[in-house]
Image (cartoon, rainbow, N blue to C red):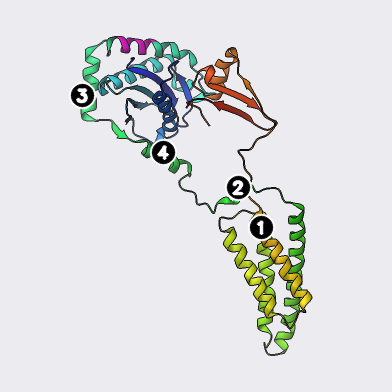
Amino acid sequence: MALILFAFVVRVRDGLPLSASTDFQHNRELQEKKQQLKVISKSLNLLPERGTIKGHELHIYFLSSEGVAYLMVCACSLPVAVAFCFLEDLRWEFTASYDNSAVALATRPYPFLEFDSVIQKLKQHYNQSGGPSLGVTLAEVQEELRLSPPQVLTMEDVQLTNGAANGHIEQPAAAGQNQRLEPVSAPGILSLILNIMCAALNLIRGVHLIEYTFQDDYEGIWNVVAFLLAFVCCVFQCHLYLFHSSLKKLMSFTLLTLIILCNIFLFGLRNVWQLTFHISVACLSTLLCLNRKLLDRANDFGVEQIMLPFKSWHSFCVDSEIDAQPDQVRWSCSKTHIHCFISAPLFCSE
């Protein structure tokens, strides 16, 4: 088994893939490590210059220098000093081939795909000889590692760093305002219209009563409060129907209870039919609000799955940042989306 399995070159500031070695192995842990490389590449600007992430049979080593990071997946039996010798040699080869301006101006993934041939030669040399060609290089790296050992990280550390950098750490479920609900139904439109009507009636009656309250030494102040509170509850019922909330059930029953209590309190100012109308509208709004669910984004209809021809595979890999074999990926198109169906864990960018 080869000691060095995969090498990867990325830009530190944004994790843009610059080049990578060609891989035809289907090792499951290797595919998992490639996915981990994707996560690591997004956090390199917050990670140390040298680092190690250990696995069961495979380890990840990375080295950052002058805005470019060099990452590798290798067998756990490979000595740490040899691994960083490989990364140093890879760094020297890359900097000799491309200057900083070419790296800074790169906009598409894998702009230096031809560097793969250099990586393959370097991998072959290390896998056959077991180390660098010059012993002094290994001695120098060993001394550097002794003075400044690489930091041993876990994927949890990297994911936490990545989440903190992008503001994705434990967003509360109440931030569901951005989640899409099912389309508004005809009964829902009717309930909104009736709720707005009830809110308007409550507001008009409440404002009208304020004049008499000031004249009668505030004897009807609680009637004004009941009308205005019912008005506010009707408005919030409309809002709760239109926008998602994690506390939807609690808020719905609370608003319904307040509306019922307000209308019971106003029994002397409203007849039985008026009270029945207001309470019925509130019950209808509560029922529709509770039954309106979040839109399931996983359901996508009218999609035709097709296999990607091998000749188009190379271009697809370059454009989509996918490192996998043609028999592992299927893609399909619908009116609004392009879907990628993957039969094995792959290294894909978002």
Tag 2 or tag 3, which sits nearer the N-term?
3
Amino acid type at mark 4: Gln
Task: Give the total number of marks visible in the rendering.
Answer: 4
Q: Quadrant of the N terminus?
A: top left
The amino acid type of the residue labelled 1 equals Cys
> Contact, CB < 8 Å: mark 3 with mark 1?
no
Q: Going from the N terminus, do you reach mark 1 or mark 2 first?
A: 2
Question: Secondary structure of the magenta portion, mostly?
Answer: helix
Q: Nearer the viewer, residue 270 or 53?
A: 270
Marks 4 and 1, how far apart at CA: 37 Å
Q: Residues within 10 Å of mark 2 (few under 14, many from 20)?
A: few
Q: CA distance from mark 1 to mark 2?
A: 15 Å
Magenta stretch, residue numbers: 121-128
Ranked by sequence position, the earlier of labels 4 and 3 is 3
Residue 114 in the image, given as x and y percentages of width and height: 48, 13
- Residue at numbered disc 1: 289
From the viewer's perspective, is residue 336 above or below residue 99? Answer: below
Question: Mark 4 highlights which residue?
Answer: 159
Mark 1–mark 2 CB contact (< 8 Å): no
Q: Indicate which label's residue lies in the foreground, 3 or 2.
A: 2
Q: Secondary structure at mark 2?
A: loop
Which of the two discs, 3 and 1, labels the residue nearer the N terminus? 3
